Image (spheres, rainbow, N blue to C red):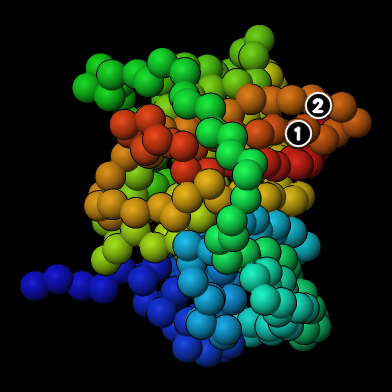
Amino acid sequence: MTTTHPMDELFDAATESGEVEIPAGWGQGRATFGGLLGGLLQARSLGEWSLDPATLRATTTSFVAPVTPGPARLETVLLRQGSSATQTEVRLWQVDERTGQDSVRTLQLSSYGAPRASTVEVAAPGPGPIADLSRLYAVPYLPGLTPEFLAQIELTPATGGMPFSGSDSGDLTGFMRYRQAPAAMTLPHFLCLVDGWPPAAGALLTKPTAMSTLSWTVEMLTEPTGAPDQHWWYEVVTDAAHDGYAHTHASIFTAAGDPVAISRQTISIFG
């Protein structure tokens, strides 16, 4: 007997309706894991306007306030639909159980563009040396010690330091995949997975310190396809860090080294 993955149920619900239930089991500190929210809002955008996921060029998600398990409302706005480009906005609203206030918790802007003829053609750079997965060990999920969402996502570091390790570098590489494979590797599932790695700049810290993503942009180079349980290769560089904020960019490849996406983050560091 097989059961439906809660993530599949959530994304399917968002495709059909703006009323969703944020599931438990995806915690990241006091908030719901940002990757799940990014995938959720993207699913709503695709479903609301029947958009082709292969045409997503870039999507930016702003995490305005913590989202918690429970009911949420997804509000959509079609900003513009031209002959080839479409711009959308999706806002996640949630009522605060303590104050009763209904407010925007997460916002996503997405840009879709149909292919067009062009004389400009520049190939995306390939990855650095891809590690031998058989020689590496995945980060275990330890209830109460590691973030709750790591029960869903498997991270296998190859190079670089983990958070609060006092590393001399804010760069890292590794593999990622779902511990329990979803029904298919759709665009929302891919976006959710991409956000699985902790902020790379956290490796520079010498003690546990609160961090959160302020803004997250993913630029798609091609549509993610393949087996839902496949590994993806991740390379991230910390570009700068100052005034309590860090800026990173990451490249995501198939395990065979084919470029798929670029992920950029602005991260708040509270210490």
Quadrant housing the C terminus = top right
Residue that label 2 marks: 241
Q: Residue at x 57, y 66 (%)?
A: 114
Q: Residue at x 59, y 56 (%)?
A: 117
- Which x, y percent locates residue 265? 70, 42
Give the label on residue 247, or none. Answer: 1
Q: CA distance from mark 2 to mark 1?
A: 6 Å
Q: Considering the numbered disc 2 on the image, is that residue within a helix, a strand or a loop?
A: strand
Q: Residue at x 20, y 72 (%)?
A: 3
Quadrant housing the N terminus = bottom left
| Amino acid type, callout 1 | His
| Amino acid type, callout 2 | Ala
Left-right relation of 45 to 24:
right
Dot 2 or dot 1: first in sequence order is: 2
- Which x, y percent locates residue 209? 70, 33
Which image quarter: residue 199? top right
Few, some or many C-alpha atoms within 10 Å of disc 1 (few <14, some 14-19, many ≥20)? many
Left-right relation of 266 to 163:
right
Give the label on residue 51, or none. Answer: none
Q: Say above or below: 68 vs 72.
A: above
Left-right relation of 3 to 111:
left
Residue 72 vs residue 239, the one in the foreground: 239
Q: Say above or below: 202 vs 44.
A: above
Q: Say above or below: 214 vs 259.
A: below
Q: Residue at x 37, y 77 (%)?
A: 9
- Which x, y percent locates residue 232? 38, 39
Task: Evaluate if marks 2 and 1 touch, with contact meaning CB atoms under 8 Å apart.
Answer: yes
Residue 94 vs residue 75, the one in the foreground: 75
Is residue 208 visible in the rendered image? The answer is no
Which image quarter: residue 168? top right
Q: Considering the numbered disc 1 on the image, is that residue within a helix, a strand or a loop?
A: strand
